[in-house]
Amino acid sequence: MFYFIIAIVLLLDQGSKAAVQMMMYQGESIPIVKKVFHLTYILNPGAAFGFLAHQTNLFIIVTLVLVLGVLLFYRRLPLERALLRYGLALIVGGALGNLVDRLRFGRVVDFLDFRIWPVFNLADSAIVIGACLLILDFLKDATQKPDKESG
């Protein structure tokens, strides 16, 4: 299931970005729900919100190290840690989606524009959802561990 989730995230991300690139010109914004949600095609030279713009090589190296680390860590996870497994799969799928863009274009294709938030893409969404699952797993694990003082 882990590799299936990674593949689905990667396919949906790259497919949606290809559709945007074929149907829109860079900088174009199409209102879907006026003043609430637009499709806005931009090329982001940095990370989230343009952070560390034009550091493409750094992002490529960090992503490769992160993905390799997660793949090695994943093999040691017990099956009952489903939230952690799914969260890591979403993060890896999203990271690989943005990595493909950086390798192809030197920048990341973004297009989901909620007007009150910087423009992002499906890979970014997968990473955020995956991180939320990691937090839930941590909280679940913390509440299930017995208190050492109470026995």
Image (cartoon, helix red, strand yellow):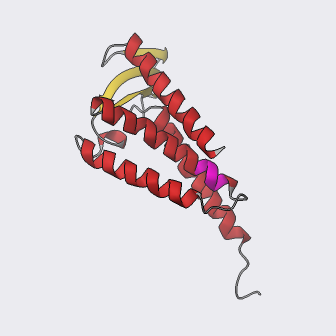
* Residue 148 shows in the view: yes
State whether residue 82 is above or below residue 96. Answer: below
- The N terminus - image quarter: top right
Q: Residue furthest top?
A: 23
Q: Residue at x 40, y 37 (%)?
A: 98
Q: Is residue 54 above or below residue 147?
A: above
138 or 102, which is in the foreground?
Answer: 102
**Does 121 appear in magenta?**
no
What residue span does the magenta drawing correspond to?
83-87
Q: How many labels does the image show?
A: 0
Q: Classify 119 as above or below 88.
A: above
Q: In this view, does 149 lie to the left or right of 72?
A: right
Q: Which residue is drawn at 55% across and 44% down?
A: 90
In the picture, residue 38 is in which quadrant? top left
Quadrant containing the C terminus in the rendered view: bottom right
Give the residue displayed 48% in from the left and 23% down from the top: 16
In the picture, measured across the screen, residue 6 lies left or right of residue 141, that is left
Measuring from the top left, give residue 24's x and y in whole percent.
Answer: 37, 13
86 is within the stretch colored magenta: yes
In percent of width and height, residue 73 lies at 54, 60
